[in-house]
Amino acid sequence: MNDPMAIMIGEVLERRRRMIQVSQAKLAEICSVEEKYISMLERGKRKPGLKTLFKLAAAFDMKAWELTKEIEEKLEKNGYSPILKE
């Protein structure tokens, strides 16, 4: 996957993880997911599902809407609109 949205989501997730000073393994444990999945998220190879997004936000001591807003702001700053235009 070479999806700009996935890459930017991964950048936000990695930055947030580093802010709380935990390893990928520890974040995976907190979120009840595989460490490989966290790695794939951070590298932009996967996008988190809604349930995982809520778990990640909780791990970062945030509300899901706050994490989503941060992701959306990064996307907009980089000229990528997550809104599909028909």
Image (cartoon, rainbow, N blue to C red):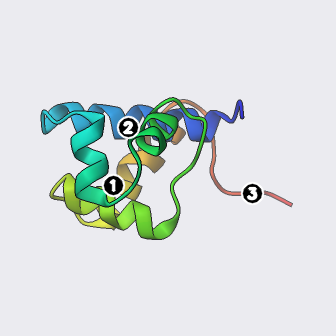
Residue type for callout 2: Val
Tag 1, which secondary structure?
helix
Q: Quadrant of residue 80?
A: top right
As measured in the structure, the alpha-carbon distance from the residue carrying label 1 to the one carrying label 3 is: 20 Å
Give the residue displayed 51% in from the left and 29% down from the top.
Answer: 43
Q: Residue furthest right?
A: 86
Residue 55 drawn above or below residue 5? below
Residue at x 26% of width, y 52% of height:
29
Q: Which residue is mark 3?
A: 84
Q: Is residue 39 left or right of residue 20?
A: right
Q: Of discs 1 and 3, which sits in the foreground?
A: 1
As measured in the structure, the alpha-carbon distance from the residue carrying label 2 to the one carrying label 1 is 9 Å
Q: Amino acid at mark 1?
A: Leu
Q: Horizontal placement of 53 versus 44: left or right? A: left
Q: Residue 40 in the image: x percent, y percent?
A: 52, 37
Under circle 3, the secondary element is loop
Q: CA distance from mark 3 to mark 2?
A: 21 Å
Image quarter for residue 51? bottom left
Kindly check if marks 2 and 1 are in contact, taking CB atoms under 8 A apart as contact.
Answer: yes
Q: Looking at the rendering, in which quadrant would you find the N terminus?
A: top right
Q: Amino acid at mark 3?
A: Leu
Q: Residue at x 41, y 42 (%)?
A: 38
- Element type at marker 2? helix
Please tell me which of labels 3 and 2 falls first in the chain.
Answer: 2
Q: Quadrant of the C terminus?
A: bottom right
Residue 23 bears which disc, if any? none
Residue denoted by label 1? 67
Number of numbered discs overlaid on the protein picture: 3
**Mark 2 lies on residue:** 12
Residue 2 occupies which quadrant of the picture?
Answer: top right
Query: Is residue 50 found left or right of 31 in the rendered image?
Result: right
